[in-house]
Image (cartoon, coloured by chain):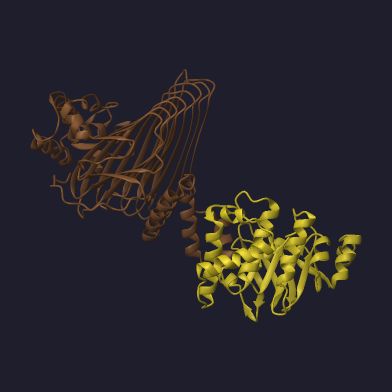
Chain colours: A brown, B yellow
Amino acid sequence: MNMQTTSRQTAAESALIEAYNAQLGDLPGNGAVISARDRLVDDLKTNGLPTRRVEAWHYTDLKTLLRAIPGAVPAAVIDTPEPLVEGSAVITTRHGHADPKVSVSDVLVNAFSEMLSEGTAAPGLSVIDRDDTIGKINGSFVRDGFVLEFPAGAQIEKPVEIQVLHGDGQVHTRFPVSFGAGSRATVIERHLPTGKGDAFVTSVSDISLEDGADVTWIILQQQGASDTHLGQLRVRVGSNAKLRLYVINAGGRLVRQELRIDVAGEGSDLQLRGVNLLGGETHTDVTLVLGHHVPNTTSTEIFRNVVFDRARGVFQGMIKVALDAQKTDARMACNTLLMSDDAEFSAKPELEIFADDVQCGHGATVADIDANHLYYLMARGVPRNKARAMLVNAFVAEIVEELEDEQLVEALEAIISSWLEKHA
Amino acid sequence: MLEIRNLHARIAEDGTEIIRGLNLTVKAGEVAAIMGPNGSGKSTLSYILSGREDYEVTEGEILYNGESILELDPAERASKGIFLAFQYPVEIPGVATMQFLKVAMNEQRKARGEAELTTPDFIRRVKEAAAELKINPDMLKRPLNVGFSGGEKKRAEILQMALLEPQLCVLDETDSGLDIDALKIVADGVNALRSPDRAVIVITHYQRLLDYIVPDTVHVLYKGQIIRTGDKSLAHELEANGYADIIGEAA
């Protein structure tokens, strides 16, 4: 329910509307795209940003938390960092603009701005539901991104790393990606800031796995200490397809990463793994809506959260099992280490099951590190602080180690260790 | 090397007294066996020596090389050379065995003011010690103790002991769950560490381990006290007659 229609516009809401008006005629898109954008902005104007009274945003009251939107800053030259895995194909958006003339062997790559100009992007500039604020903002403002098509049967050995780089200001990107039947690939969606001030980032990835595709998709979010990151991943998983999805949050001041996953093909398997490293006075929300729509599918969802300082974390995990989706096997776990008395984490698992022959479970734990483990390490001469750090690291490294690519595991573990060293 | 005087200790959480006036002296170079029926306080004694915080010492003293260790935490005791081989080593997912060994060895060296090991030197030491104990190198690639069989866990404990070169080794029922071949390998590992400046305390239920690690002294622990001390023949006597006679005498 949207109840705030009559309330006054906040600074952030006004800034969004103004930013849209200021960019009229400048945003790419044909007539159909412009009408779609107008509809989304009208929706924002009418309904505003969601408050805690909107169920889907209950723990992330965006209207209150999003205090301001930085102005649009012209794109600066941004250096390209080394990819996580040596030899990866790197494609880069800088401050919301896709690098021209990029290519990845065996993969079709196009700029999303072309889809906007041609109008083929218009149907995608829609909302999933009325509370899809990220879809609304991104659809209104998105300028560019990449469209990737992995052909049927393509076996891409090295990861494709999409670097979403930006300076201060507003950045809105979109990445429609399709994995053809029987294709196999690893894609890393990596969000990195280079500015020192505020950035307001929205990014939507819209991916589909055709029958038998085998995909590893990693979202690595390392935004700056004053950045807002609103991310959304829309996924459709086809028959006998396998998706390993990793979400790693290690930055940002205000972060919401939505995962909207439709398991739409029989025999498919989803392994969702999440790591949330939270510190400072930040707010990070991962919201999952997972629909099992057909029989005989499996999914596991494991989140590991480490919360320091006055940071607040949220995990909302909704699993829906349709009436027809017999033999669904879905298991969700959310485990949190609270490292300070002021740290906070809210976990809200929800199961909505209409089929009668399913296995569904969820569990949430909030704890300190295991005293037996700490004692064991100390009994071998590891000082208390170092032993604690090792165990915190282990708590999240365990998740990352499930990946098969050794180089990727090492790169992610290095990011996790260096984050923990800075915050512990 | 170790002198325990009139030690009283209890479980911190509920105050249950487990050790009730225990006296024990172990000299450098000595192998002391501690035997006793279930629930007599054997494992508790090993935990207290290692500094486990679940137990509170309420009275008495533990002197190690002439100094009290009661105020030291487990890591400080370990770097002073006290090692406990656990009866049930914990599995720690996410901590790589090799990384753990390297951190433990180097942290102890740092605490003693010694230089850290270079990576090649470290790897050479682990390989040599692992080969002696017939440890499959693949085991060392796994997270610490995760998925190890009971016997593998015990061997991993002895491997750590060999690498850390402690002065006082406490083996808590290291023989439990071992078949005879594994028992011999573990005993050989312990015997290789016997030296004039190192003491070993072997806690066990059974005479069997003492056929392979021959003790200099045998102590019977019952209701938190040492009720009888003797030489290795005491272990044979216990094997033949059980604890009933000795407990009867003490009572």
Q: Which quarter shows the N terminus of chain B? A: bottom right
Residue A191 to residue A28: above or below:
below
Image quadrant of residue B109? bottom right
Identify the residue shown where x is 38% and y is 58%: A418
- The foreground one among A190 and A196 is A190
Q: Position of residue A158 (x, y in %)?
A: 39, 44
Left/right placement of residue B195 relative to residue A166 reads right
Q: Is residue A340 visible?
A: no
Q: Position of residue B139 (x, y in %)?
A: 61, 54
Residue A292 to residue A85: above or below:
above
Residue placed furthest toward the front: A105
Left/right placement of residue A14 relative to residue A281 reads left
Left/right placement of residue A72 relative to residue B251 reads left
- The foreground one among A196 and A226 is A196
Q: Position of residue B200 (x, y in %)?
A: 72, 71
Q: Which quarter shows the C terminus of chain B? A: bottom right
- The foreground one among B205 and A176 is A176
Residue A77 to residue A93: above or below:
below
Residue placed furthest toward the top: A324
Identify the residue shown where x is 18% and y is 30%: A116
- The foreground one among B18 and B210 is B210
Q: Is residue A395 visible?
A: yes
Tally the numbered discs: 0
Image quadrant of residue A54? top left
Q: Position of residue A241 (x, y in %)?
A: 45, 29
